[in-house]
Image (cartoon, grey):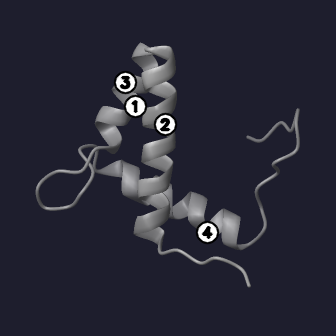
Amino acid sequence: MEDKITTKEAYAAMYAYLKMLHDMTGSDDLGVFLGSLSLLEDGTPADPGVWDDWMRAVQQARLGQVDLTLGSDEE
């Protein structure tokens, strides 16, 4: 049986993964990016455009339009 999670749970998983990378590397770029992904008290991302970008990425994944192969060159 395939695991299924909600879009919000997937967002939280992505955030947790990027936070782990930031904790391991101390990357300033990741830190800034995590700041824009962080949720405000009302549940919306600090950067208002992030959610639309996230939903576009979710749609691409649902449609099988994400190339996960090493060396893929996506636009």
Kind of residue indicated by mark 3: Gly
For numbered disc 2, what is the local secondary structure?
helix
Residue under the point 20% across and 61% down? 43
Kind of residue indicated by mark 1: Phe
Going from the N terminus, do you reach mark 2 or mark 3 first? 2
Kind of residue indicated by mark 2: Leu
Residue under the point 44% across and 19% down? 29
Q: Is 3 in front, or is 42?
A: 3
Residue under the point 23% across and 44% down? 46
As drawn, the label of residue 33 is: 1
Q: Which residue is mark 4?
A: 59
Kind of residue indicated by mark 4: Gln
Q: Which residue is mark 2?
A: 18
- The answer to the question of whether label 3 and label 4 lie on touching residues, with beta carbons closer than 8 A, is no
Classify residue 1 by image quadrant.
bottom right
- The answer to the question of whether label 3 and label 1 lie on touching residues, with beta carbons closer than 8 A, is yes
Residue 19 place in picture, x, y as percent: 42, 35
Left or right relative to 61: residue 22:
left
Left or right relative to 7: residue 38:
left
Classify residue 9 by image quadrant.
bottom left
Q: Is 67 in front, or is 12?
A: 12
As drawn, the label of residue 31 is: 3
- The answer to the question of whether label 1 and label 2 lie on touching residues, with beta carbons closer than 8 A, is yes
Graded by Cα atoms within 10 Å as few (under 14), some (14 to 19) or many (20 or more), the crowding at tag 3 reads: some
